[in-house]
Image (cartoon, rainbow, N blue to C red):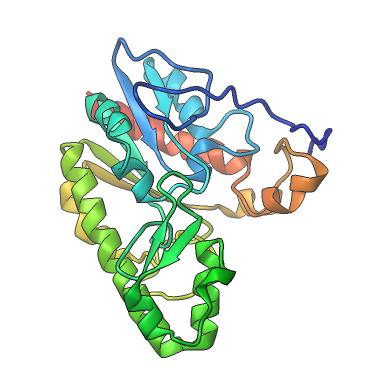
Amino acid sequence: MTFPVAAHGALDYFPCRYGRSRVLFRGPKRPLDGPYVAFLGGTETYGRFIETPFPALVEPALGQACINFGVINAGLDLYLHDPGILSLAERAEITVLQILGAQNMSNRYYSVHPRRNDRFLRASDRLQELFPEVDFTDFHFNRHLLGHLRDTGPDRFEQVVEELRLAWLARMKHILTLLRGRVVLLWLADHPPPAGPVSGLDGSPLFIDRTMIEALRPRAMDVLEMPRSEEARRRGAPGMLHTDFEAAAAAELLGPQAHAETAEALAPLLQDLLG
């Protein structure tokens, strides 16, 4: 069942910092003085509205600390601009990297906030020339911006999408190199990776398809695909801890069943890789 409570928030995430990072991560804070597995990702890895997200569910099976470096609405830029966290992930036995959408990162067309990657900051000269009729001061979030560009000029919008895809692939290769390839890529979504290029704005991760993931496979230890099961779809949001005001946002996210299924698939995979 759902647990709506007072407006101050339904769940204590015990926010904490690690190393030199300025980012607040989900706690309770875990020890870094022994072997550990690092988890990088967005809202799903963080476990918004989830009492025990999949990184915490994996920990008992592995017998070593699982450090949740997930951040709500994170894009790749958050990690690439935070050398402290990448350094901690590089020290991990293995890093589980959730496959994030391509929209929440700076590129040749627009810039995003360095820590709140879903926030649009400014359009480049290139984007202003491509869409001269658009007033970019009207936008605060990347998805809102992209939806307007698609409606304004679908053909021109495809140029932006192609830039995001290319930039995402280059940055993913860079992260995998920095982490020495000791990475499991994790696809978490309502659906399997699309077979070919997509430019729709429904669902997540935006603009990522199977060809892009397969291009990364040789650089990673493994790839785990976890599309939401029928049972998880039927259960929806029940079991998530949120206020009445947050109910709509909670309904769009993975629920406890999806987190349990993800942990159940991840744990034996990580055990094998850890030897």
State the residue at coordinates (65%, 38%). Answer: 49
State the residue at coordinates (35%, 21%). Answer: 19
Which corner quadrant holds the N terminus? top right
Residue 59 against residue 75 in the figure, above or below: above
Q: Is residue 234 left or right of residue 198?
A: right
State the residue at coordinates (38%, 44%). Answer: 78
Residue 5 locus on image (x, y percent): 83, 33
Residue 264 or residue 207, whichever sits in front: 207
Residue 175 against residue 63 in the figure, above or below: below
Which corner quadrant holds the C terminus? top left
* Residue furthest out toward the top: 33
Residue 245 or residue 182, whichever sits in front: 245
The reply to whether residue 234 is in sight is: yes
The reply to whether residue 197 is in sight is: no
State the residue at coordinates (39%, 12%). Answer: 31
Quarter assignment of residue 268: top left
Quarter assignment of residue 215: bottom left
Residue 116 or residue 232, whichever sits in front: 116
Residue 175 against residue 189 in the figure, above or below: above
Residue 266 against residue 198 in the figure, above or below: above
Total of numbered circles in the picture?
Answer: 0
Residue 140 locus on image (x, y percent): 56, 61
Q: Is residue 115 left or right of residue 250?
A: left
Residue 38 locus on image (x, y percent): 35, 29
Q: Is residue 233 left or right of residue 143?
A: right
